[in-house]
Image: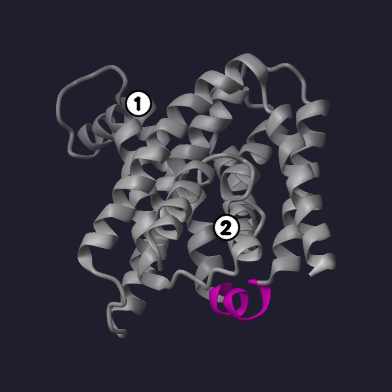
Amino acid sequence: MDLIQFILLALIQGITEFLPISSSAHLLIPGMLFGWPDQGLAYDIAVHFGTLLAVIAYFRQDLIRMSCRIFSVGENTSTDESRELIFNLVVATIPLVIAGFLFSNFVEEHLRDAWIISIASLIFGLMLGWVWLSRDVSKRNRITAGDAVFIGFAQCLAIIPGVSRSGITITAGLYLGLNLASAVRFSFLLAIPAILGAVTLGVNLLIQEALPLSYVHLVFSVFISGFSGYLTIAAFFGVVDRIGLMPFIIYRVLLSLGLMILLLSS
């Protein structure tokens, strides 16, 4: 893996992981244009670990409050809210854990295909567009246990490459009537256990293999994806507050159609 490929793929992962535009679809593009081979499991784990550090760093205050609630440190009046958030995150994560355990091998063997990624990206991009255009302007920001269950089952669809984990969870939140800021915040917090689980599973698989990359390369990958991921999260909250989701939806649909055209012409 040369330096340009190294940097570009880490940037793509860091920028697209948290946007509702499908990171899998974007990671297809360099390979299709330049004929780059698969980056391998070690690199994949490194860039995902970087995005995990990014979301932890951005939501560090929320995580500190939740940790204090778990260990009963202090008597902050926000503890009830923190307890509810912890419960909702756990509830929403359980379906993904079960789905990953049952279907991860099937997905790897049968669904990691360029056509499937492109079609899934298009379908779920259009679904996000439909929910965004038909939504009621809502001020509801409290997520109930029922909301968490629904969003958790929706997140299970993200094991299909091209669906976009952030895209499907934001879609589910908006469909339930949450305001955009609350849907995005819960989606991003939900990324922590999701990415942590994926990284843990990947490390367990990697233990059985020889490490194909140097530690310097892996640390560099973590830094690039983490730094770009943190900036993306910060920018996304400000951007969607001003312009909403429609630019991202249009971009995702056009990208999906473009990938299909490339596949047809190849």
- Specify whether 22 is left or right of 5: right
What's the magenta bit mostly, secondary-structure-wise? helix
| Residue depicted at 42% across the width and 40% down the height | 229
Disc 1, SS:
helix
The stretch drawn in magenta includes residue 111: yes
Q: Nearer the viewer, mark 1 or mark 2?
A: 2
The stretch drawn in magenta includes residue 97: no
N-term mark: 1 or 2? 2
| Residue depicted at 81% across the width and 51% down the height | 257
The residue type indicated by label 2 comes to Leu
Range of the magenta residues?
103-112
List the residue tagged with mark 1.
80
What color scheme is it? Answer: one colour
Question: Which image quadrant is residue 120 in?
Answer: bottom right
Instruction: State the quadrant of the N terminus.
Output: bottom left
| Residue depicted at 46% across the width and 44% down the height | 190
The residue type indicated by label 1 comes to Asp
Identify which residue, 62 or 242, lies in the foreground: 242
Q: CA distance from mark 1 to mark 2?
A: 41 Å
- Specify whether 103 is left or right of 80: right
Question: How far from the left and from the top, in percent, is residue 208?
Answer: 30, 85
The crowding category of the residue bearing disc 2, from other C-alpha atoms within 10 Å (few below 14, some 14 to 19, many at least 20), is: some
Question: How far from the left and from the top, in percent, is residue 153?
Answer: 62, 53
Question: How far from the left and from the top, in percent, is residue 169?
Answer: 60, 43
List the residue tagged with mark 2.
27
| Residue depicted at 67% across the width and 79% down the height | 110
Residue 119: in sight, yes or no? no
Does residue 205 sit above or below 44 in this rendering? Answer: below
